[in-house]
Amino acid sequence: MANTRESTEIIVKAVPGFAPAWQDFLREWEKVNPPPLYLAMGELAHYIVDAYVRGNTAEFVELFAAIEVALQEENTELHILLSVGLFEDIQNISSHRTFDSKSFRHWLGRESLRAWDQVELACGKSRQGQQNEDHDGGSFGDGRNALVTKEHCRR
């Protein structure tokens, strides 16, 4: 089982176009152990949304496949990093564009969809545009516990 940093590096390698930003991040935070991977996931989220806007989605299949594999690991820290650090950022950034975050759903695997939906429930907005303040994470009603709760969300 890979640790969070190793899994993050595997994900980043699936997106060669993001390599320069990743190298800049590593240089900037080389004296911090562990580096603040949430910041790198925020940068990756911007990269993903910007690539989508440009129609440059060729890297998405491998990227989201790598994320899917990582989410199958039993690593709570990694799950929260990808859910809140990446998926929530993609959803937030997309909400300020001419499309919404649903545009990314077809690239997501089963575990990724589960994490994505948890973020939408805990951090996102309902269909009526109201902040979902009453959802505490909890469970999905089908026996699956939600890993992401309101406390994880960056509002």
Image: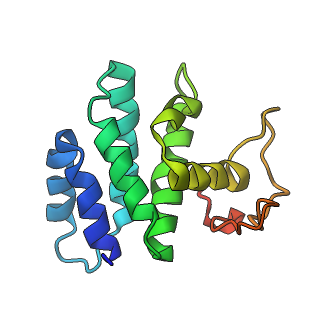
| Front residue of 138 and 72 | 72
Q: Is residue 71 above or below residue 18?
A: below
Q: Quadrant of the N terminus?
A: bottom left
Residue at coordinates 45% horizontally, 76% vertically from top-left? 75
Q: In this view, does 119 lie above or below 90?
A: below
Q: Is residue 85 at least partly visible in the picture?
A: yes
Q: Quadrant of residue 36?
A: bottom left
In this rendering, position of residue 15 left or right of residue 141: left
Residue at coordinates 30% horizontally, 75% vertically from top-left? 2
Q: In which quarter of the image is residue 17?
A: top left
Q: How many marks?
A: 0
Residue at coordinates 35% horizontally, 65% vertically from top-left? 37
Q: Is residue 95 at least partly visible in the picture?
A: no
In this rendering, position of residue 135 left or right of residue 104: right
| Front residue of 81 and 62 | 62
| Front residue of 134 and 39 | 134
Q: Position of residue 51 (x, y in %)?
A: 32, 29
In this rendering, position of residue 98 left or right of residue 141: left
Q: Where is residue 126 in the image (x, y as percent from the top left)?
A: 78, 40
Q: Where is residue 53 in the image (x, y as percent from the top left)?
A: 39, 22
